[in-house]
Amino acid sequence: MRHIYILTILLSFISCQQKTTKTASNLKPAYAIVIHGGAGTIEKKDMDAATEKLYLDALNEALNIGETILKNGGKSIDAVEATIRYMEDSPLFNAGKGAVFTNEGKNELDASIMTGENQMAGAVGSIMTVKNPISAARAVMEKSEHVMMIGKGAETFAANCGLEIVDPSYFHTEKRWNSLQKILKEDEQKTELSEDEKGNKKHGTVGCVALDKAGNIVAGTSTGGMTNKRFNRLGDAPIIGAGTYADNNTCGVSCTGHGEYFIRYTVARDIAAMMEYKGVSLKEACQYIVYEKLVQKGGEGGLVAIDKDGNIEMPFNSSGMYRGFAKDGKREVKIYKD
């Protein structure tokens, strides 16, 4: 009987430990960060090992920058800005230095940022001289009474705020220029997705969402638009509610895809609205919007999101999406579908 008694106590202890472990794994992380570098026709069969490594290294470095800030108790807004600035400075991505060319042979840059604590937001569109558009978007949010500025006015405002101004030639890369020349020969009216180093077509946008130790969510997005775009066309990246959205009570979202669809169906806000009004989880909202609603409407692309509890989603309905996340020591960086 004594052995049975001891065995019962031992089994009870093991059961308690299992429950404790399970509960601990479901606890809200101290911080979380998720990024994307564009979605599109990105397939492993078309990617050589060297090019794949370039992108994986860049994604990992972007995460390193943001995670270091968050891990040390920094603010989510600083993590998002610093992370996106790094991606803007990399010619691998269609944002900042790696921006594609318009029909006129220019680089027009767009960006937006939003804080979940109070729904403050800032955005810039069609700027050509500000080195880091995401910083200009933050300046609009923090140093003006407005949400969006575009063109020359936005550039003047950014300069007055002390942001780094560069000659438009800074954004010129031979690969992007050659992409424009190719499409002009084929069809002068047609717009086209950006290409990665191996010619894979993708919706060229970078984005980041972060949750800091104080529980504040911030989302940001930056892009160079579409190759051969005309008439100062803007996509979803600088549009609050379409390409970017954040609310501490629900989630933060940054999108990448065919901008016109993301604008029409206010994709970023729709994710948060489903959580707010229907009470669904972040995963349920993302799956419905990306895999059902967008697909039914003909919209291609994806998004990255973090909810108030630190849960992360990175859904996309294209063949690939440059993406990754980090939280509490766990990290994942991917390009293709699983």
Image (cartoon, rainbow, N blue to C red):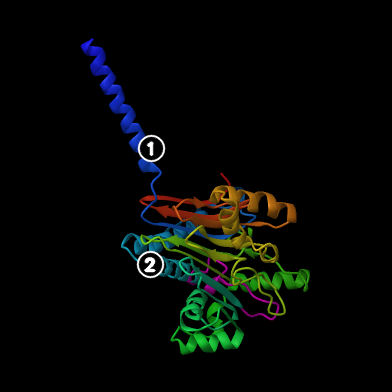
Give the image location of residue 29, x and y in percent. 38, 52
273 sits left or right of 252 in the view:
right
Dot 2, how many residues are within 10 Å of its Cα: few (below 14), some (14-19), or many (20+)?
Answer: many
Look at mark 2 in the image and give the residue it sits on. 75
The residue positioned 45% from the left and 83% from the top of the image is: 163
Q: Quadrant of the C terminus?
A: top right
State which region is magenta. 89-107
Amino acid under label 1? Lys
Give the image location of residue 132, x and y in percent. 49, 76
Look at mark 1 in the image and give the residue it sits on. 22
Give the image location of residue 268, x and y in percent. 59, 61
Q: Quadrant of the N terminus?
A: top left
Q: Is residue 118 magenta?
A: no
Work out whether 92 lies above or below 122. Answer: above
**SS type, badge 1:** helix
Q: Is residue 91 magenta?
A: yes
